[in-house]
Structures are given as structure tokens and as C-alpha cells.
Image (spheres, rainbow, N blue to C red):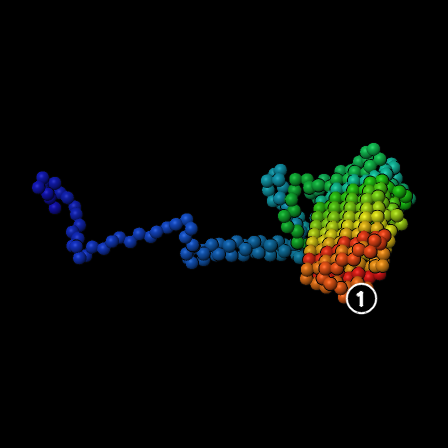
Amino acid sequence: MSNDNGKREDYIDLREDDYKEPAFEESSATEPLKPRRLKRRWGKLGALLITAGLIFMAAGWVLGARGGSIWFDRNRGRFSFSTGEEAARNDINITQRNMETFTSAEISSSVADVEFIPSNDYGLEIRVPEGTKPEWKIENGTLKVEINSNNKINLFGFYISTADYFVKVYYPKNKLGNVEIDVLSGDVFFPEAEVGRLAVKVAAGDVKAGAIRYSIAQIEANAGDIEFDGFGEPGETEISVSAGTITASVKDGKKVNLKTDAGDIIADLEGCESVEVKTSSGEITLNGIDTNNTSMELKTNLGSIRIDGENADDEYILKNGGKYTLNAKASSGDIIINE
């Protein structure tokens, strides 16, 4: 159609009755996802999980149910795969016997159990998986062992190896100086021995330790159980667990501190001068307490208190000027005191 100037002008003739406001969809950063979008996202996640499952099924079929591990090499930036048999063949083994004398030890391991074994001589045995880097030396009378990852990360392992990974320390049955053990994943076994200071720290694993004489024993585990025997002439004893059970026996100790966030505490504490026990969630059972000669402060928020079989108040305080002191608290759990 042309106008007065002779120029054509396209237009749409809309009658007033036919006109409708255009509909615009409002959007907002806080607008919830539409059901269709949620379905798409869940669908993608489901597809990813199914794909991962198919990959592991294929790996299992190739292995003939032998198992294996998937590794990521940080240096090369690539993944690698090893079967259970290959892992066993590629284990790193170190054996040293008739070593020079050492009087103290510092052991740090990320993937192995640590065990001290009384022997006729000084020695060391190490077995760790491929991808770790074991180093050891004797410096100023101290055996130092360190086992760390060698730029390889075990992303996923789906077999139980028949070959245990360990660090075994052999020493003549006599007095050791300071012993420090730090384990990321593994158990710790320390036999009855005379030590100056015993310090054990485990992220995931159990600890079983005993010492005839010591000035300080400090044992800590994030996830695992602790069994400890201290007798003869024990000094200060500190044992703590984030999630696990503490089973301890300390005789004639000067100071005993037992603590767990989630787990029970069972202890024989005959002749211990000062005792402090605490659990956030669990039961406390203390034996060998001279109730007639011990000043006690006991408290439980959700639980009951029993002393020599008799019920007591949820907050029980007894100050009799005795030789021993006991402070026990359970946020959720019972407290049982036996002579």
C-alpha cells in the first residue's frame, strides 16, 4: 500500500476489538526450576551413574572378578588401571635386619599398618602398594620412616588384597625413647615396652598399645577403636576418639584423660590419682575406683548414674577430701562406677 508520498508502507491492520496485550514470561534468578528442567537434570545424573556402572561392570568382566584399582597420575594427567594380581606383583618390599642401634622412632604412613615387635636385633620391614614412596633412615639415634603417595592417587579400589601392607619395626626388648606414630589409614600395634613418650595418631584405623612405663602417652583416633594397657609406673595418659570405643587399663597413673565424641568408654583405673572422662554420646564404665577415697563429680544429661550398683542423681558431687579425684560427664549415656 502507498502513502501520500507515493512510498509503499507495509502494515498490519488491527481492529481495536481484536487487539490483545502480548504475553511475556517473567524470569527471575530465584525462580524455581520448572518440572521439565528438573527432569532433564535428573535424567543427566541418572545417565552418568548408569554409564559409571557399566564401566565397572565391564572392568569386572575383563578381570574375571579378580578385582583391581583405578589410579590417577598427577604428573602425566591420566588414569591407569591395575588388576589385583598386578598390584600384588608390583608391591614394594623392603627388609633390613641387624641395623644400627636406634633408641627412638618416628613413623609416618598413609597406607599401611604399623607394628613394633620385640626382637634380638634392630630391623625394619616394609610392604606398600605401587604408587607410594617409602623412605627411611636412622638419624641421631632415631629411626625415621615416611610413606607417602608418589604422585598417584588411588581413586577407587574394588578388591581386598591378600597381601597386607605394613611397616614392622624390630627392636631389642629394652627401653625406647620417644615413639611417634602417624597413620592416615591403617592399624597400629605397639607392645608392652618402656618408653619415654608415646604419641599415636590415626585418621582411620584401630590402635592397640601397651606400655610398662612412660612419662606421657597420647593416643588419638578419628575413626576407630583404641585398646590401651598402661601399668607399672605410668605417667600422664591422654586418649581421645572422634568415633569409636576406648578400652583402657591404667594402674597407678598420675593423670588420666579419656574422651570420645561418639562411643563407649570402658576403663580399669585402679590407683589413678586424677581422672577425667567425657563422652558426648556413649556409656562410661569405670572400674577399680576407690569410692571411699575419691572426690567425684559425675554428670549425665540423658542417662543414669550408678555407683557400686546404687542409683545416684543425674548430677552427683562428692567431695570427701580423698586421695583421688574423678570427673566424668556423659551428654547422652549412662555413667557406671565400680570399686
Which residue is identified by label 1? 309
Residue 21 can be seen in this image? yes
**Which of the pair 228/18 is nearer the observer?**
228
Query: Which corner quadrant holds the C terminus?
Result: bottom right
**Which of the pair 230/275 is nearer the observer?**
275
Q: How crowded is mark 1: few (under 14 residues within 10 Å), some or many (20 or more)?
A: few
Q: Number of callouts in the render?
A: 1
Q: Is residue 307 left or right of residue 330?
A: right
Q: In this view, does 143 lie above or below 321?
A: above
| Residue furthest out toward the bottom | 310
**At 71% across and 46% down in the image, what residue appears?**
184
Residue 91 can be seen in this image? no
**Which of the pair 94/178 is nearer the observer?**
178
**At 80% across and 66% down in the image, what residue appears?**
309
Residue 107 location, x and y as percent?
77, 42
**At 41% across and 56% down in the image, what residue appears?**
34
| Residue furthest out toward the top | 140
Residue 141 location, x and y as percent?
84, 35
Residue type at mark 1? Answer: Gly
Q: In this view, does 191 lie to the left or right of 49?
A: right
**Which of the pair 286/24 is nearer the observer?**
286
| Residue furthest out toward the front | 320
**At 70% across and 52% down in the image, what residue appears?**
242
Residue 15 location, x and y as percent?
16, 54
Residue 29 location, x and y as percent?
41, 48
Answer with the quarter of the image where residue 139 lies.
Answer: top right
Q: Is residue 228 above or below residue 106?
A: below
SS type, badge 1: loop
